[in-house]
Image: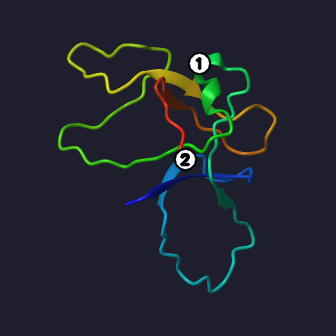
Amino acid sequence: MDLRRALTMLAAEGDADFQCLPADPEIETVVTRAMFSSNTHGSEYETNGATALSSLYNHEVPCAVCFTNTTTTIMISASKTCYSGWKLEYRGFLITERNGLANNKQSTCVDQDAEAAP
């Protein structure tokens, strides 16, 4: 399945979670529209001067959802290593939305070997 990336934004009360959406979403017919709603938009790398990720600037963020039969994962901020007995999946950079925008913000760990969408 070709998955696309999206982030709900532009609303102060909107969702702050990243979402992986299919290229061919199944959209229900909207019968009524709520008085207050938010939009979903694609995500881009906005690295502005971050030398480690500068090659990704203005490229779309790729997305993949994978199944594993092992364990769940957790992101540990301000750490490059895992606790004893835990397995490191990847390490990277903690990023979030810039200050000054009236929307919810969520931090996420971007792989130090991140890729741009083709």
Are the residues at dot 1 and dot 2 in contact (C-beta closer than 8 Å)?
A: no
CA neighbours of label 2 inside 10 A, class few (<14), some (14 to 19), many (20+): some
Q: Earlier in the sequence, mark 1 or mark 2?
A: 2
Q: Which residue is mark 1?
A: 52
Q: Considering only vertical position in the picture, is 106 above or below 3?
A: above
Element type at marker 1?
helix
Disc 1 to disc 2, how far (Cα)?
Answer: 24 Å
**What's the residue type where badge 2 is placed?**
Asp
Give x and y (percent) for residue 104: 67, 43
Q: Is residue 81 left or right of residue 34?
A: left
**What's the residue type where badge 1 is placed?**
Ala
Which numbered disc covers residue 82?
none
Placement of the N terminus among the 4 image quadrants: bottom left
Q: Is residue 23 left or right of residue 60?
A: left
Give x and y (percent) for residue 55: 62, 28
CA neighbours of label 1 inside 10 A, class few (<14), some (14 to 19), many (20+): few
What residue lies at 67% left-to-right and 33% top-to-bottom? 57
Q: Which residue is mark 2?
A: 17
Give x and y (percent) for residue 31: 62, 86
